[in-house]
Image (cartoon, grey):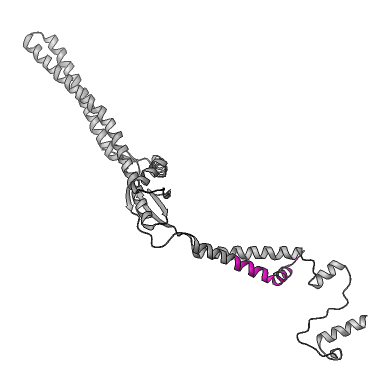
Amino acid sequence: TMDLKAYLAILWRRKWVVAITTIVTVTVAVVGTVVATPVYEASTTLRIPTARRGSADWVDYDVRYADRLMNTYAQIAASGPVIEELTQRLGLDRPPEVQVETLANSELMRITVEDPNPVLARDAANALSNILIDQSREQFAADRESAQQILSQQLAQLEEELDLARQEYGSLVTQFPGDTERTAAARSSIELKEATYGTLLEQYDQARIRDSIQANIPYVIEPAEIPGAPSRPNRRLNIAMGVLVGLLGGIGLAFLFENLDTKLYTTAQIRETTDLPMLVNIPAARKRRQVGFLNGDSAEGEAFRHLRTKI
């Protein structure tokens, strides 16, 4: 097993491997960052009101339906037909990169467009939000007209029946003034139709109120603006990642070279490899010595005298 000192000793011996690997990696990261085409990011934030249900007397918020509606709008905004319409509306040769996200615990949805052209990124984000709003209004108007149109047709038909019944009643009163049974039956039919007409009219008014209450068409609360700086490449992040990857790679190469190297560097390595006792440890001289240093008091001279004695 190796302790921390042994690991540090290996790194110190292979310091040039670590340094060169780090420098090369950082250089590659810097060159790649400089060469890469800058990409700008613009975002538009929309609010989709929580769906409401009820009548003129009471209103309830359908939160569960609102979550499904938010996800539906997000899917529609990123769908192929909407992106194709955006491409045609802006006259682009290729569709921009679009990301749609719903902000948690809110009624907000963010549409983000990335493009090398900052002006195009802003225009595309705003245009995409307008397309989504237009489609939402068209769908809501179609659904509302469909329900109200049915009630309106029923009201018109019942009005015709009422007019006809009143005319018949007037004719019966004129032709048969003494026939109370027939006039009473005609009067009863008119009253029934009037009650039905009143019920339909009330339903029609409630439908109009309900539609106005349930209207949850999205609208823009923060339009996109021209970004002042590119979102990527992130120079600081790339350089930091280059330093980190270079250090890790250099350390890995240092230990790899250490395992492949058969040279022995430390006393422990020699003792472990040869399984022989050590006679003496002679330190490296810090400066050049004279030939007769064995008679001096230097550390290396003392080590050689120990070695001579043991031999």
Place residue 229 in its image quadrant: bottom left
Q: Outermost residue toward the right?
A: 311
Place residue 284 in its image quadrant: bottom right
Left or right: where 236 falls relative to 86:
right
Residue 102 % position (x, y): 42, 48
Residue 49 in sight in this render? no
- Residue 271 among magenta residues: no
Q: Quadrant of the N terminus?
A: bottom right
Q: How many marks?
A: 0
Which contiguous range is marked in magenta?
2-24
Looking at the image, which residue is at 14% across and 13% down? 184
Looking at the image, which residue is at 36% across and 59% down? 226
Left or right: where 3 falls relative to 79:
right
Q: Nearer the viewer, residue 163 or 94?
A: 94
**Mostly what secondary structure, the magenta segment?**
helix
Residue 266 in sight in this render? yes
Residue 49 % position (x, y): 34, 45
Quick check: 40 above or below 160?
A: below
Residue 74 % position (x, y): 41, 44
- Residue 23 among magenta residues: yes
Residue 89 % position (x, y): 33, 46
Quick check: 165 above or below 130?
A: above
Q: Quadrant of the C terminus?
A: bottom right
Looking at the image, which residue is at 14% across and 16% down? 187
Looking at the image, which residue is at 82% across and 84% down? 300
Quick check: 43 above or below 194?
A: below
Place residue 261 in its image quadrant: bottom right
Left or right: where 248 falls relative to 59:
right
Quick check: 211 above or below 36?
A: above
